[in-house]
Amino acid sequence: MENRYPMPQPFGWFHIAFSDELKPGEVFPKKFFGQHLVLFRTDQGEPKLLDAYCPHLGAHLGYGGTVHGDSITCPFHSWRFNGDGICIEVPYATRPPRVVGKACIKSWALTEANRSIYAWYHPRGIDPSFEVIRIPDFHEQEEEWTEFLRKQWTVRCHIQEAHENLIDTAHFQYVHQVKPVFEFSFNQHRCQIVMDSSPQASALRSRIITECNGPGQTWARHKGFPEFIVLNPVTPLNNEDVVFNIAVTFRKRVAKNLQLVHDKVLVDMCKQVERDIPIFENKIYRSSPLYCEDDGPIQEFRHWYRQFYDS
């Protein structure tokens, strides 16, 4: 199915790795936003992201490249580049070429926060226009939260379709067999979705507060029992495929002897995601759908989302 989507990839901060996946000195090839990239962590612990191909003779730095200090060395001829994409050494050259000391590989803006590494993407290379939100629990109360339980999927859909699912109120009843009550707010590059369990089930009432910071940073607080936070970012691989992540962490004070509960939370969340995936992968995008008043604020959401497309 070709050209399912009329919209391009949006700009913003996007999750590209969890912090514990990248140790000092490690190098990984990555492919996001339709581009080949190389992610590495310097010996000093700083994550760096560069375009993948060496400007010399085109070797991919992610396959055999090695870290030395704050630079990465090409596996083909040992040209060295720092995290800003500046060539700092051509070791065999009797006379250093003019490229030494100059930026010759694109360097990507990164932020490490929330146990995650985020990259800024803009199709025209414009600098970040807003910041990653640092969730206070991960920066002020880190010791109070458990390690992540994680799951990842690659899905054939556009990132906007995945996010639009969050505010499609009617589908929760028919796909997920729940009928919650919703509140929505949109404010500049952020939106918030509050979902309460049905008032008829007050004994089991729970509240989920989902927040989006642009199209690439999404997380939710689950206020019922057990209390937990889930990171659920979506990152474009290209215009037709995305990576879904779920990473769940629980408050330690209620975590003891609750491993079965924790495992069940992750299993149940995965089941809900996997109910959506066949729909995502086989639907088309309707620019002018036939709306029903009970569909949720799809038009308002689309208006908010349009700000992240380069005009």
Image: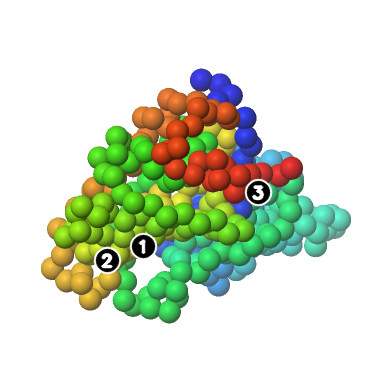
- Report crowding for label 3: few under 14, some 14 to 19, many 20 or more residues within 10 A (C-alpha): some
**Amino acid identity at mark 1:** Arg
Q: Is residue 85 visible to us here?
A: no
Identify the residue shown where x is 49% and y is 32%.
291
- Report crowding for label 1: few under 14, some 14 to 19, many 20 or more residues within 10 A (C-alpha): some
Label 1 secondary element: strand
Identify the residue shown where x is 47% and y is 58%.
192
Q: How far apart are marks 3 and 2 (CA)?
A: 33 Å
- Can you tell which mark lies on residue 188? none
Q: Is residue 253 visible to us here?
A: yes
Residue 256 vs residue 290, the one in the foreground: 290
Q: Where is residue 265 in the image (x, y as percent from the top left)?
A: 23, 54
The number of discs equals 3
Q: Distance between the residues labelled 3 and 1?
A: 26 Å
Q: Are marks 1 and 2 in contact (CB under 8 Å)?
A: yes
For disc 3, the marked residue is 307
Label 3 secondary element: helix
For disc 1, the marked residue is 221
Label 2 secondary element: loop
Question: From the viewer's perspective, is 244 left or right of 266?
Answer: right
Q: Residue 219: which quarter of the image?
A: bottom left
**Amino acid identity at mark 3:** Gln
Residue 161 vs residue 27, the one in the foreground: 161
Q: Distance between the residues labelled 1 and 2?
A: 8 Å
Q: Where is residue 292 in the image (x, y as percent from the top left)?
A: 45, 33
Q: In this view, does 104 lie above or below 42?
A: above
Q: Where is residue 12 in the image (x, y as percent from the top left)?
A: 61, 53
For disc 2, the marked residue is 227
